[in-house]
Amino acid sequence: MACSARILVTAWCFFVGISVSVLGWQGLVYGLPPPCESQIYCTGDLLKQVQLARLFSDDKHFVDMPLRESPELVLKKFQQLVNVTPGGILSKEQLQQFVSSSFSDPGQEFEQWEPQDWTSSPQILAKISDQKLQAWASDLNARWKSLGRKIKDDVRTHPMFYSQIYVPHPLMVPGGRFIEYYYWDSYWVIEGLLLSEMAVTAKGMIQNFLYLVERYGHIPNGGRVYYLRRSQPPFLTLMMDAYLAHANDTEFLRENIHLLEVEYEFWQRNRSVSLTVGDRNHTLNYYSVQIGEPRPESYSKDWELVTDLNEDARQELWAELKSAAESGWDFSSRWFLSWPPPLPAKLKDTKARAVVPVDLNAFLCKTEHLLASFYRILGDTTKAAQFQAALERRLESVQAVFWNEAAGVWLDFNLLKKQPNPAFYPSNLAPLWTDCFSDQAAAERAVQYLEGSTVLSYKNGLPTSLARTGEQWDLPNAWPPLQHMVIAGLAKSSSSRAKEIAFALAQNWIRTNFALYKKYQAMFEKYNVDGDGKPGTGGEYQVQEGFGWTNGVVLQLLDLYGDRLTSGSPSNPFGAWIVAACIFLLNLK
């Protein structure tokens, strides 16, 4: 957003008197618990020594390795080595030998499995006019077989030997280094499975998440014990809605709606914050993981980041990193305190707990709407009224706290700065996707917001932000779920201009994904919006192939626009508008 726009936002805040007092947001309390209780996978000297010795290029490798013998025996043997080693720090060679003898390679938790409901010719293929795109969609449909996993029963009977969290039904993983299930990824995977007519597999994945809610009271970030004490964006109720739209399985809903409510209450009980805007109090939600120590899967990176900090500051930053990871956006300038650009921004500035995010509250707004609808279907008018009231309160709060008249869009609110973040993120438009607004002119304003920025000038996709920080959830990367949210939100608008932009964005995204598929015979978790298009960059690991949610989003866009999308070379459909505008301005001189 331009400097003048930032000034407008600030002036608007002053004009409407948005003095915000934060009632529910507290500083971190130290003596924080570790990511889980395992003395091997989550905390302790063994984890620290192995990860800081960098035995593997990716810290995740070690914490995904199953044990060959009981954790008690492994820890006892390790301690014996420590006791006879001067200074207690084992050499890299000692650690390599110890790990080789005590652990197995990652992936031993799974057994061979192919989905029985897979079909080679789902009906979606017939909806795609472009023959090259149709063949591509057929390839993507076949990839479900390579992403399918079933967890061995030994993980259930001997959980102490594994970092994998057992779930009873087969599932789809994202791909690459992500060999376990992840929470919010699975929403787009499930949508793709349903379009591939794999409703049994999709239902099984939802049953797994319901199993986790019943066991833990929430859904962990992913399928590892080191993710246990943080979650990810809450999509369980949206998954159920997607499944019901295909299967109309009301009995499944009736049996499990109480667990949908348990997960909703987790967010209300543990991730809520109260703000006073003017004379009204509003309760909204944010990401907040009060868990200490480095992330086990990124241990050495987290340790390097805090070398010049005292212990309290270290624990605080580690908790902030986990809170940002809970958002799914790990990591981004969105969570850095020193925004907007051109102020310097870096990972050390992460203050995710200070951000009340637009998209999280939009997701919970949709959850409240769906729970009210589900209870009406099931004939429970009392519960339906309860969630309808919660929805109406949320709509009022989203309008009061996030809607920014000067910008013409919803903006994250920063609790430390006590003002909105004027920077562009696709998440600013999430309420369009979840119908979390009352003013029908919002879609037109959102179009003006997009056209008033530079984001439509990128031919390979909608950038995640306009800040170049080197983090993967910033420029130059574009992420599949964010493309889908914006496109789907604009597409269902009554605004013809919004619909045009939605299709143009979908066309660009399909062409980008297809061009790179032809080049690499692979789908990627993220893409680069610069130049002629290439896989995404930055962050803590190399871009990963697979890729569950990328496949799901492509199938959704082909389902939405299959009769219109083409496979031709990437072009910029917004370019003509830019050229026309320039000619007009030049003619004014």
Image (cartoon, grey):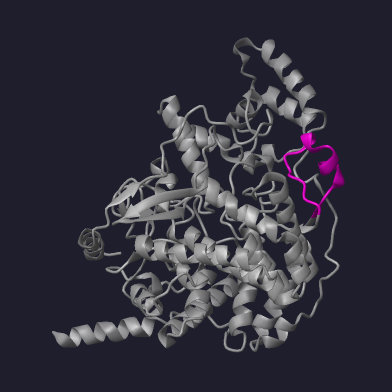
In the depicted structure, whether residue 269 falls above or below residue 42: below
- For residue 213: magenta? no
Residue 540 at what x, y percent from top left? 53, 46
Give the quarter of the figure containing the N terminus: bottom left
Residue 316 at what x, y percent from top left? 45, 34
Instruction: From the viewer's perspective, tell me whether residue 100 is left or right of residue 368.
Output: right
In the depicted structure, whether residue 498 falls above or below residue 274: below
In the image, farthest residue toward the left = 589
Residue lying at 67% horizontally and 73% vertically, measured from the top left: 377
In the depicted structure, whether residue 545 falls above or below residue 462: above
Q: Along the line of sight, which residue is nearer the eye, 557 or 194? A: 194
Instruction: From the viewer's perspective, tell me whether residue 426 is left or right of residue 45.
Output: left
Instruction: From the viewer's perspective, tell me whether residue 384 is left or right of residue 215.
Output: left
- For residue 164: magenta? yes
Q: Along the line of sight, which residue is nearer the eye, 112 or 498? A: 498
Which region shows up in magenta? 150-168
Total tally of numbered discs in the picture? 0
Residue 419 at what x, y percent from top left? 30, 54
Residue lying at 68% horizontally and 71% vertically, measured from the top left: 379
Residue lying at 59% horizontally and 12% vertically, measured from the top left: 87
Give the quarter of the figure containing the C terminus: bottom left
Residue 85 at what x, y percent from top left? 66, 12
Q: Along the line of sight, which residue is nearer the eye, 61 or 191? A: 191
Residue lying at 49% horizontally and 36% vertically, measured from the top left: 318
Q: Along the line of sight, which residue is nearer the eye, 513 or 268? A: 268
Q: Is residue 238 visible?
A: yes
Q: Is residue 527 visible?
A: no
Choose top left, top right, bottom left or bottom right for residue 173: bottom right
